[in-house]
Amino acid sequence: MINQLMTGAATRAQRLRTQVRNSAVGSHLRHLANRRNTPGIDFVPGGRLVTLRADWAEELEEISRGEPHLLTKTAADFQDVARKGHILVAVDRSENSRVVGCIVLWPLGQDESNNYWFELGTFMVRPEYRFGSRTSKAMPIGDTLYQYILLLHRHRNILGTTTNRRAVHTGQRHGMQMVSFQKLPPSIHTATCICPADKMQTDDSMQCAIKDNGCRVRISFQTWMRMGQPTQLSWTE
Ligand SMILES: CC(C)(COP(=O)(O)OP(=O)(O)OC[C@H]1O[C@@H](n2cnc3c(N)ncnc32)[C@H](O)[C@@H]1OP(=O)(O)O)[C@@H](O)C(=O)NCCC(=O)NCCS
């Protein structure tokens, strides 16, 4: 009985902590702290990208081509999301505004209640700038990109799918809530499950063998609140 009460209290405390960290004030304070930990780096949202060097989109295409785990995106793809304001790009001001990373909200369409949804993706940082790179340029640029795009788009419904446990860890640091794919609105579930048949081990994406197992969907904290706090899936890796 006492154990149950203590577990319940710990869960409520953890939820309150997540709520405070992801509130408007908490998110802005965390962003300020992140900026202090990434000296020389600017985080440029879509609309401001025209002020960057002319070849920013080609640079991003080049980085994405070097990443075997990412779908290659072309410069035209990046320019398209920039026009809509759905990309955040990290640039190194001390290196002539060299493009060093980005994160994108790819549109998934509207759900049955006419709400637009977006998928967090094309999250990448040049190897020498990564947090774990042990170089002089190692900084929490990935974390800052992730946290800032969620802050800028708090009002949007955002999800992320992944088979990569590292990506799950990153999401956990930013309040992403792991739920079952079945909790997504049906049209959004269909829109996000577009893996090739050999990965799903079936032609029917609704029967995918790795769903909620090797492959996880997480939704932003604000989306989870708007959805009425659906049951979270446990994660221990
Ligand atoms: C994903 C990516 C952008 C993250 O870059 P990063 O934030 O600089 O972090 P690193 O890759 O150096 O991560 C090394 C470790 O440090 C952790 N880490 C990163 N920032 C951290 C921070 N601010 N505080 C604590 N730990 C941190 C990471 O979570 C990871 O640990 P884990 O594997 O135990 O979870 C980068 O690895 C990348 O570009 N990868 C290739 C593209 C890719 O695979 N993208 C993800 C698709 S799902």
Image: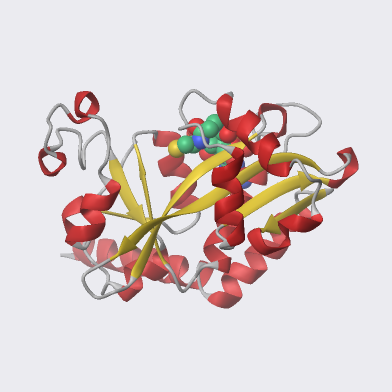
Query: Could you tell me residue 219's position as x and y percent?
Result: 36, 58
Please give left or right for residue 178 compared with residue 176 in the image. left
Q: Quadrant of ligand 1?
A: top right
Query: Could you tell me residue 215's position as x and y percent?
Result: 28, 38
Residue 208 in which image quadrant: top left
Q: Residue furthest front?
A: 76
Query: Could you tell me residue 142's position as x and y percent?
Result: 61, 44
Residue 5 in sight in this render: yes
Q: Nearer the viewer, residue 199 or 75?
A: 75
Please give left or right for residue 139 compared with residue 107 in the image. right
Quadrant of the frame with the C terminus: top left
Residue 146 in sight in this render: no
The residue lying at 57 percent from left, 26 percent from top is: 65
Q: Is 206 rendered above or below residue 24?
A: above
The residue lying at 79 percent from left, 51 percent from top is: 52
The residue lying at 67 percent from left, 45 percent from top is: 141
